[in-house]
Image: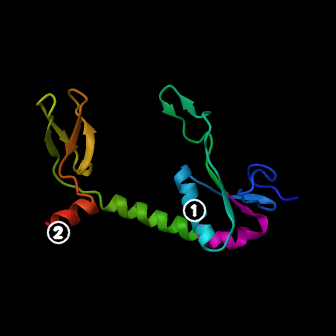
């Protein structure tokens, strides 16, 4: 009997997997779809079960870890999927390590709030981000924000 991750033979366009197995617990729905795309590009049929539940909601936002988006493949494709998943996790770990190392260090950044006019200091690692003014709660730009690729190209063409 062929069953999809979400049920048996629901909808014409829904991919069906024989004997489905969850092979990856993603942090977000977006990550789950990214991993699925990597598997499909390697010729491995995969399906995503998104976290669309409200079970993790409470008055202060989302509770992490209640439900996880998952990527599923057929049981006979698990061995072919493992190297793809391992490569993804290795690249993601390298990207995260590079991001932590690339964080700027140095002098705190002084920002003057446009709403209240008061000065505030932010750590150097907040360079290029938007933060809340500690005095009035308005949003302030901390340091120089790097332009998007399109803005940079437009300024070079002018």
Q: How is the image coloured?
A: rainbow
Helix, strand, or loop for circle 2? helix
Residue 27 in sight: no
Give the left or right position of residue 82, taking residue 102 as reference: right
Q: What is the distance, in whole Å, between disc 2 and disc 1 at their CAs?
A: 37 Å
**Counting residues from the N terminus, which is met first, the one under dot 2 or under dot 1?**
1
In the rendered view, tell whether residue 140 sits above or below residue 87: above
- Residue designated by label 2: 157
- Residue designated by label 1: 35
Name the residue rendered at 27%, 39% in the picture: 131
Tell which of 126 and 156 is nearer to you.
Answer: 156
Helix, strand, or loop for circle 1? helix
In the rendered view, tell whether residue 74 sits above or below residue 43: above
Question: Which corner quadrant holds the N terminus?
Answer: bottom right
**Displayed quadrant of residue 53:** top right
From the top left corner, tell me how far across and down residue 8 is, in percent.
82, 51
Tell which of 148 and 141 is nearer to you.
Answer: 148
**Magenta stretch bounds:** 72-85
Does the magenta run of residues contain 111? no
From the top left corner, tell me how far across and down residue 112 is, in percent.
12, 37
Task: Tally the numbered discs.
Answer: 2
Question: Which corner quadrant holds the C terminus?
Answer: bottom left
């Amino acid at each position: 009997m062929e069953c999809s991750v979400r049920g048996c033979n629901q909808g014409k366009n829904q991919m069906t997997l024989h004997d489905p197995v969850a092979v990856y617990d993603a942090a977000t729905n977006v990550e789950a779809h990214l991993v699925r795309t990597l598997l499909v590009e390697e010729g491995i049929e995969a399906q995503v079960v998104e976290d669309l539940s409200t079970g993790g909601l409470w008055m202060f936002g989302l509770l992490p870890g209640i439900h996880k988006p998952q990527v599923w493949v057929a049981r006979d494709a698990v061995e072919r999927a493992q190297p793809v998943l391992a490569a993804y996790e290795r690249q993601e770990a390298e990207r995260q390590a590079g991001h932590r190392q690339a964080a700027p260090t140095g002098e705190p950044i002084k920002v003057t709030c446009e709403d209240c006019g008061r000065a505030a200091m932010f750590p150097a690692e907040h360079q290029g981000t938007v933060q809340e003014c500690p005095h009035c709660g308005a949003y302030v730009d901390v340091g120089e924000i790097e332009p998007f690729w399109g803005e940079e190209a437009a300024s070079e063409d002018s």
